[in-house]
């Protein structure tokens, strides 16, 4: 079927055409009609299935009629990145409608947002905390609200926003259309849905299973060799755009810096960055200025980059659902993608949980010429002495005889070997396991892998490594 079936206003249809949309995705095909009919809807589908357009297009259609300059649609999202993505989609799909939207989230100035609200907008895309600030300050008027959307509801509640959402609901008109979109339906969301939705239509698409366009592979490795394994995979794989997931903000920053030192065009996305730097990282990743983005789960949802060819789990996700959301960043828009996961012996329980959720066994792979027996470096080997140790060293020095000439200081010990990008000092002999490439700067040497530059774009290679059953 085509989008013509929905009989959108020409100004809305123009946005669909401008983005090159021809056929709706399953969530759009099933979800748009009841939303257009004014019904409350529960939309259950994983990331990358086109949920944003499934509610943005009907909202644009509805708001074309009626007053302007009043907040008539409110979309609540869990992260700034997702809020910006929705705002961008509204701008693109509604480019001919002259409907205006604004984003409200923390980490940026309050007053510029208040000024835009005073100037008049029809659609607000907000994160819960900053929206409550505007409600409390009286800078937003929600009395004319017609449509409420809770997007990525399960992620919102995972982040502890349920109390904030309930406070927001008390400030909204009771008569409204409510849409709830989520990838999963835990008990908390189910209870909330029963409370706030009226006779909702439920639309389910591919719940709980990864997209069929994604291939999966598990790379077992010692925890101290994760960075070497990551670099080895990148050297041995032709990639276009890679998203690497870590568990913590500190590790995302560190791994991103290690990849930069190894010659890759890499950046990181994590919560300690200012909003301007986060937006710059996202923009650079979208336009190809950065080939690799290292991120925490903040990017697992709301990162709309259709050309991501590989997702690599540097750290194992905490739940099977999180695994599905992470790898859902690749294999989008009918493209194929690869999901690589580095696993240690401590991850075995989560591996089993993921395999149970998928209903199939993850393929195990090993890399040829990779030194799996390399030892971990003693973190004390190159540690700088503490101030107390330096004081003790001076006070423990033997006293000089009275009148004796000061003895020259002894020559310092040879410097410890320079660390590689992982902070690991091992420097194995090069092998022929990786592709021969010339880096833009001298890369970090990895265990059993020949250094090289970031893989060239274009050609995609088959499975990397040797399979094990």
Image (spheres, rainbow, N blue to C red):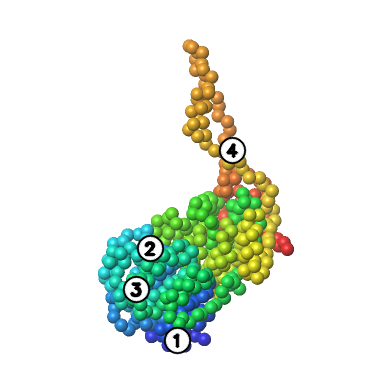
- Name the spot of residue 365 as percent of width and height, x first: 68, 60
Q: Residue at left 60%, top 66%?
A: 338
| Element class at badge 3 | loop
Closer to us: 59 or 16: 59
The residues tagged by marks 1 and 2 sit, at their Cα atoms, a distance apart of: 35 Å
The residues tagged by marks 1 and 4 sit, at their Cα atoms, a distance apart of: 67 Å
First in sequence: mark 1 vs mark 4 = 1
First in sequence: mark 2 vs mark 4 = 2
Name the residue that disc number 4 marks.
Answer: 381
First in sequence: mark 3 vs mark 2 = 2
Q: Is residue 396 above or below residue 308?
A: above
Task: Characterize the local packing of mark 2: few (<14), some (14-19) or many (20 or more) Cα atoms within 10 angstroms.
Answer: some
Q: Is residue 87 above or below residue 440?
A: below
| Element class at badge 2 | helix
Work out which quarter of the rendered image holds the C terminus and state it. Answer: bottom right
| Element class at badge 4 | loop
Task: Characterize the local packing of mark 1: few (<14), some (14-19) or many (20 or more) Cα atoms within 10 angstroms.
Answer: some
Closer to us: 312 or 421: 312
First in sequence: mark 3 vs mark 4 = 3
Q: Residue at left 35%, top 65%?
A: 132
- Name the spot of residue 235 as percent of width and height, x first: 61, 57
Name the residue that disc number 2 marks.
Answer: 129
Q: Using the rendered view, name the quadrant where residue 362 is placed.
A: bottom right
Name the residue that disc number 3 marks.
Answer: 172
Q: Are marks 2 and 4 in contact (CB under 8 Å)?
A: no
Horizontal arrangement in the rendering, residue 465 relative to residue 73 (left or right): right
The residues tagged by marks 3 and 2 sit, at their Cα atoms, a distance apart of: 16 Å
Name the residue that disc number 1 marks.
Answer: 6
């Amino acid at each position: 079927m085509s989008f013509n079936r929905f009989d959108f206003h020409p100004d809305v249809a123009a946005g669909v055409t401008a983005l090159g949309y021809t056929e709706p995705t399953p969530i759009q095909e099933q979800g748009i009609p009841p939303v257009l009919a004014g019904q409350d809807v529960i939309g259950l589908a994983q990331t990358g299935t086109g949920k944003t357009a499934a509610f943005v297009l009907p909202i644009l259609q509805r708001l074309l009629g009626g007053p302007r300059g009043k907040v008539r649609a409110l979309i609540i999202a869990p992260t700034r990145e997702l809020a910006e993505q929705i705002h961008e989609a509204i701008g693109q799909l509604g480019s001919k409608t002259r409907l205006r939207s604004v984003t409200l989230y923390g980490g940026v100035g309050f007053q510029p947002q208040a000024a835009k609200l005073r100037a008049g907008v029809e659609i607000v895309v907000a994160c819960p905390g900053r929206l409550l600030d505007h409600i409390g300050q009286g800078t937003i008027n929600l009395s004319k609200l017609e449509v409420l959307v809770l997007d990525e509801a399960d992620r919102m509640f995972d982040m502890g926003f349920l109390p904030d959402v309930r406070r927001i609901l008390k400030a909204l008109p009771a008569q409204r259309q409510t849409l709830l979109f989520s990838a999963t339906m835990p008990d908390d969301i189910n209870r909330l849905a029963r409370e706030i939705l009226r006779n909702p239509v439920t639309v389910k698409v591919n719940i709980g299973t990864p997209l069929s366009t994604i291939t999966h592979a598990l790379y077992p490795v010692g925890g101290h060799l994760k960075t070497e394994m990551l670099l080895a995979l990148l050297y041995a794989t032709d990639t276009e755009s890679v998203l690497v997931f870590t568990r913590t903000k500190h590790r995302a920053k560190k791994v991103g810096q290690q990849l930069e030192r190894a010659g890759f065009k890499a950046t990181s996305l994590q919560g300690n960055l200012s909003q301007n730097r986060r937006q710059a990282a996202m923009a650079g990743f979208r336009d190809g200025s950065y080939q690799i983005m290292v991120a925490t789960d903040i990017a697992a949802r709301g990162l709309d980059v259709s050309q991501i060819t590989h997702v690599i789990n540097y750290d194992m996700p905490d739940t099977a659902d999180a695994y599905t959301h992470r790898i859902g960043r690749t294999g989008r828009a009918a493209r194929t993608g690869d999901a690589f996961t580095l696993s240690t012996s401590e991850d075995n329980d989560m591996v089993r949980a993921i395999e149970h959720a998928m209903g199939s066994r993850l393929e195990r792979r090993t890399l040829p010429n990779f030194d799996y027996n390399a030892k971990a470096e003693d973190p004390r080997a190159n540690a700088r002495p503490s101030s107390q140790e330096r004081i003790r060293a001076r006070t423990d020095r033997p006293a000089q005889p009275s009148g004796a000439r000061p003895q020259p200081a002894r020559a310092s010990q040879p410097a410890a070997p320079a660390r590689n990008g992982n902070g690991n000092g091992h420097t194995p002999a090069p092998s022929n396991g990786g592709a021969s490439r010339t880096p833009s700067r001298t890369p970090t040497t990895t265990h059993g892998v020949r250094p090289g530059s970031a893989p060239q774009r274009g050609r995609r290679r088959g499975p990397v490594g040797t399979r094990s059953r």
